[in-house]
Image (cartoon, rainbow, N blue to C red):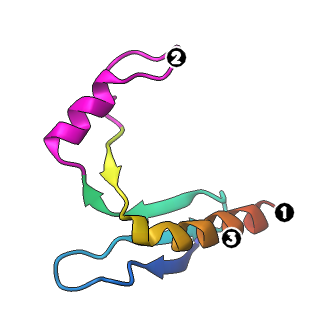
């Protein structure tokens, strides 16, 4: 796996470092961010997408991405598209 670093939360301090990478082999976006609190996880588990069961599967999780990371995620999306070509 070859990860391309895209960016890190511009407000990163000593309490966290939401970060985005792109896997250059699969074009997947790889994210590190804050674990969602229990209230958020519960709401996500109760609000299902059509055709999906309630709950969060054991192999998945809910993360919270700070809004200030949106420009970095846009860059990650662009890099993922380029990796697919």
Q: In this view, does 25 lie to the left or right of 33?
A: right
Q: How crowded is mark 1: few (under 14 residues within 10 Å), some or many (20 or more)?
A: few
Mark 2 or mark 3, which is nearer to you?
2
At numbered mark 1, what does the secondary structure look like: helix, strand or loop?
loop
- Name the residue beneath numbered marker 3: 79
Q: How crowded is mark 2: few (under 14 residues within 10 Å), some or many (20 or more)?
A: few
- Name the residue beneath numbered marker 2: 50
Magenta highlight range: 36-59
Label 3 and label 1: CA atoms lie apart by 10 Å
**Residue 6 percent location from the top left of the image:** 55, 78
Mark carried by residue 85: 1
Q: In this view, does 81 lie to the left or right of 67?
A: right
Mark 1 or mark 2, which is nearer to you?
2
**Residue 40 percent location from the top left of the image:** 24, 40
**Residue 66 percent location from the top left of the image:** 36, 64
Split into 4 quadrants, where in the image is the C terminus? bottom right
């Amino acid at each position: 796996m070859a990860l391309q670093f895209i960016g890190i939360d511009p407000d990163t301090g000593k309490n966290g470092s939401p970060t985005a990478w792109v896997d250059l082999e699969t074009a997947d976006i790889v994210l590190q961010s804050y674990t969602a609190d229990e209230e958020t996880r519960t709401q996500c588990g109760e609000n299902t997408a059509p055709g999906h069961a309630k709950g969060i599967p054991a192999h998945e999780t809910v993360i919270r991405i700070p809004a200030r990371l949106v420009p970095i995620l846009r860059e990650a999306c662009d890099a993922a598209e380029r990796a697919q070509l």
